[in-house]
Structures are given as structure tokens and as C-alpha cells.
Amino acid sequence: MQKWIDGSWFKILYFILAAFSFNSLIAGRSWMTFFSATVMAGGIILLLWRCLHLREYWNMPYLAGCILFWLSYLLSSTMNVSYGITGNLKALLWMAFQFCLLYCGRRHQDSAKREFRALEWLLLLYPGIQALISLLMLVFSYSGAAVERGMYIGVQLGRLWGSYSDPNYGAVLAVVSVIFSAAALLKGNRTGWLKRLHFFNIWLQYFYVVFSYSRTGQICLLLGAACLFWFWCRRMESSRPCKMMVGACVLILCLGGGLVREGYNRLHVTVYAAEETGSEDALHREEELSEDITNGRLSIWKDGIAVWRTSPVYGVSYRNIASYLQENLPDSYMANRAVPLNTFHNVLMDVLVSQGIAGIVLFLGLAFFMARKVIRILRDRGKGFGPEELALAAALLVIGCGAMFLSDILYINSPTAVLFWWCLGGILAGKEKYRFPGRTMI
């Protein structure tokens, strides 16, 4: 009964659901509807149980602020019900799961360690398999599309999509996987075969980030590498020249993605020939980015400001953005694309447009106080700051950085959104949540 109440099983299932939803080989298939309904039903039952025992969870830091933010979205959805309600009901349910089941919780020592190990394995196996499949598609220059499900597969539009439905989300998830594998290696208590598996996964994820040509992923990789390098320097007794050399190698790897891609284009016969004939199999985005280096993001954000001005107090609700644009701003950039956009590729803009001033004030307040508490907790750990803390904190930093260029963390079921609230809950739940041998896991 205690294991069921802890909700670790739900976190694992929720991550798998989110991961499959962003998998171009799986998303949209008929059985996914049944799987989604099953996870939803389990989450609702667990959510109702926690609501009935709210006093046991009320001391979770900033839970009241999360509930106020959720109520703000409920208000926005109610005020914009004429544009649709089904999508917003789903968004409300998913956010309730994120706040109350992923972020909020109470655990005993043993279940906390089991949960962290499960998270480690999830971030080793799933991204590893995804990256391996994607890179094999690259080797064989596979380029396809599941038209009925609206999915690109393989090499598309000058970059590697692989088996992810969006290479940007895939790249951010790959960086988080690198962080957890590196943190596992830093523990120093892994067996030989497991060490090799983690090393192999790190290289798989690195090459996926490079060939996905995701600039968001490259920024996140640089940020994650900086966190890992700082932690390594903090633990190692190596001389300063040795640390500088390692830092230079890390920097070259992070910034050398363009050379790696160009080397692939020249060495891989099939792709090189395709490049000569102008095929999209070559890994090049220069022409796409030459007209607008932001790839349309500035135009999208300008549309976001225009939408916010039409409803500045309570917003237009996230799931109604497309229909709201079509009715109120039909000449906007987002509404006149070949495929109209319904998101702003920035979590701050998404919140501002979706929930207006009320929502953005709550969100920024929560972000500030949560970040401050995370920093204080990590600082207080002092010498007890270990690889597990590093993995959770660096994952939050990387996913938060990615959310500045992607719509993530809120409103959607991306695997990185699930990881964000899972890791944030692991850090902020207090001293009783995670305990590891020799240290307190925050």
C-alpha cells in the first residue's frame, strides 16, 4: 500500500507515456489511446487519494503557489470557453499530475533510492535506444514520413530527426541523459559492463545532439558540460594544467559539432552525393537560417505580444492559441504559415499569452523562490554535495534553458516536462525525501 501511495509507479508510467508521445515511430498509433487512458485513470485515482489526504502533503514547498497557478489557468480556460474546452481540460489534468503527483510527494528512504535508480535506468535505456535507432537511420540515409500520423522520420530538412517527433525535444532529452550517465560514472561504484554502457550512451547522445542540428540542444549541451566539468574539478585533486586541458577538450567537443556534421557530409558517400544533387539528405540548415537566424522565433514572439495585448489580464488559454489567432489576428505570422502554429517556443511567452498578467506574475514568483531554495539547499550540502544532487540540479538547469527556445515544462506532456517536475520535487521535498549512503539527498 505504501509503494502505491508513494506514486513512483505513476512517475515511471507517465514518463513512458510522454516519451512515446514524442516518438515518431509510436506516437499516434491506436494502442497509444488505450495506454494514455490507462495512465490517466491511474493518475486520477492517485490524485483523488492525495486530495483526500492533503494535510499530509501541504508542507511541500510552494505547493500553494502551484495550485494558484493552476487556478489561474482554470480561469483563463473558463473565460475563453467559446474557443474550445476539451484541450484545456486535458492541459488542466496534465498540470495537476505534474504539480501534485510528480512534484509533490512523500517518501521513505528505501522507496526514494529505488525511485532514483528507476530514473537513472529510464534515462539510460530509452534515450539510448532512441539515439541508436536515429543514428542508424543517419548511417543508411533513411528519410521517411508517417503521413497519417503527421510525423517526420529519419533525415529531414537538413537535420536528423531520427525516431523523435521533434529533434529539439530529442536533443534536450539527450543532454539530460548525458548528465545522468556522467553522474553515474562519477559515483565510482559501477561495474565494468555498466560503466561501458554509460560511456557508450554518452557518445550516442552527443552524436544525436550534433546531427540533430538543434541549436537549443547545443546550448544545453554546453551548459550541461559546464556543470559536469565544475563538479569534476571540485572532486578531483588534479593539477590546474590538467583541469585546463580537460576543460579545453570538453569545450572543443561541445563547440565542434559543425565540424563533425561537415565531416559526415563529406565522408558518407550517399549523403555527399545527395548534397551534390540538392537532396535534403545532407545535414545543412544554412539556407534555412540565412534569412532569419532565429528561425522565425522573433516573429512568433512578436505575435505573442500582439495576442497578449488583446487579453492582458487572464490570457487566451494555451490550447486555444491557434483558434484565437485565426479569429482575432488572421494576418499574423503564426496564422499564415503553411502549417499554422499554436505555440510560442518560449515558456515565458506561453504563460504570458495563455494566462495573462496573473499567470506570468505567479510563474515568475514561483521560478524565483524555487530557484533560490534549490541554490540554498545545494549550498548547504557543502562537501556532501554528490553526483545524485548534480544530476537532478543540472537536469533542471538544462531543461529550463531549453524552455527558453521550446514550449516545455507547462501545458504539454513532453518527456522533459515530466523530468523537470520529477527532479524539482526530488530537490525541494525536504530532508526526508532522498537519503543516500554517506549523505542526505536533499
Image: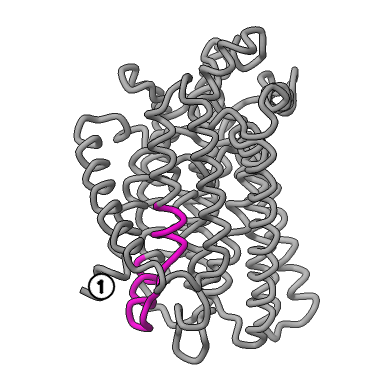
Number of callouts: 1
- Pick the residue in front: 253 or 380: 380
Give the SS element for disc 1: helix
Q: Amino acid at mark 1?
A: Lys
- Pick the residue in front: 90 or 153: 90
Quadrant of res 309: top right
**Left or right: residue 230 compared with residue 391:** right
Residue at the (30%, 53%) spot, across then down: 43
Quadrant of res 366: bottom right
Q: Which residues are magenta?
A: 97-118
Disc 1 marks which residue? 3
Residue at the (27%, 41%) spot, across then down: 36
Considering only vertical position in the picture, is 80 above or below 218? above
Residue 272 visible in image: no
**Left or right: residue 72 compared with residue 229:** left
The spot of residue 430 in percent (x, y) is: 52, 78
Task: Assign the N terminus to one quadrant of the image.
Answer: bottom left
Q: Main secondary structure of the magenta part?
A: helix
Residue at the (49%, 49%) spot, across then down: 417
Q: Residue furthest bottom?
A: 438
Considering only vertical position in the picture, is 187 above or below 176? below
Q: How would you rate the neighbour count of disc 1 (Cα within 10 Å): few for under 14, some for 14-19, many for 20 or more?
A: few
